[in-house]
Image (tube, grey):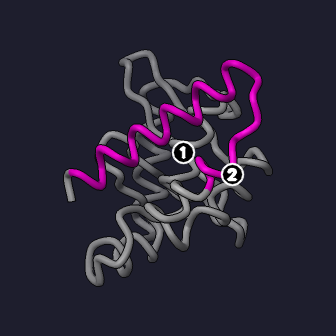
Amino acid sequence: MSLLNDVHMQLILQVKTAYKNHNPLSDQLLSALNFVQQRPLLQAFDLVDRKNVTRVTCPAGRTVFQVCGSSGKLYTCFASSNFCSCPAYVFSVLKKKDVSMCKHVLAVELSCATGSCRDLSVSDEELTQMLLSNLATT
């Protein structure tokens, strides 16, 4: 799985470079991303296009991401661990292990790479409450 993660990270870097240089994503890059990620890729790009990813930061330096899913429900993602509070993460990533990440985590990576992530600053207490309320519903 480590080799696959390395390939994935290289592809995300290529996405970031393409957007930084104002170049379109090549068919070859999109094909490689699709091969590595399979099912969640198109859904993740849809979330990015809709600007459904928000980076939430607090004064203590903590950062989490909230992704508004296709159903309108907010999911909390920790990009550093590829964790998401959605049911697909538990079922497809942890139990079945048929994908390496859910569409929400992939959308976080893509939105950060493309600079399309919205930013929200909250207090430490607000972030704690946000996490408690969002993670309690999973």
Image height of 134 relative to 16, above or below: below
Which of the image's four quarters has the N terminus?
bottom left
Residue topped by disc 1: 108
Is 18 colored magenta in this rendering? yes
Pick whichever of labels 2 and 1 is earlier in the sequence.
2
The rendered magenta stretch, by its main secondary structure, is classed as: helix
Residue 121 appears at what percent x and percent y? 58, 23
Which of the image's four quarters has the C terminus?
bottom left
Image height of 126 relative to 91, above or below: above
Could you tell me how many numbered marks the image carries?
2
- Looking at the picture, tell me which residue is in the foreground, 133 or 87: 87
Which residue corresponds to the image point at 49% horizontal and 65% vertical from the top-left? 35
* C-alpha distance separating marks 2 and 1: 21 Å
Instruction: Point out the stretch of residues depicted in magenta.
Output: 3-30
Snapshot quadrant of residue 47: bottom right
Image height of 42 relative to 47, above or below: below
Which residue corresponds to the image point at 29% horizontal and 44% vertical from the top-left? 6
Q: Is residue 50 left or right of residue 128?
A: right
Which residue corresponds to the image point at 58% horizontal and 43% vertical from the top-left? 110
Q: Which residue is farthest front?
A: 28
Image height of 113 relative to 29, above or below: above
Query: Looking at numbered disc 1 in the image, what kind of residue is underneath it?
Result: Val
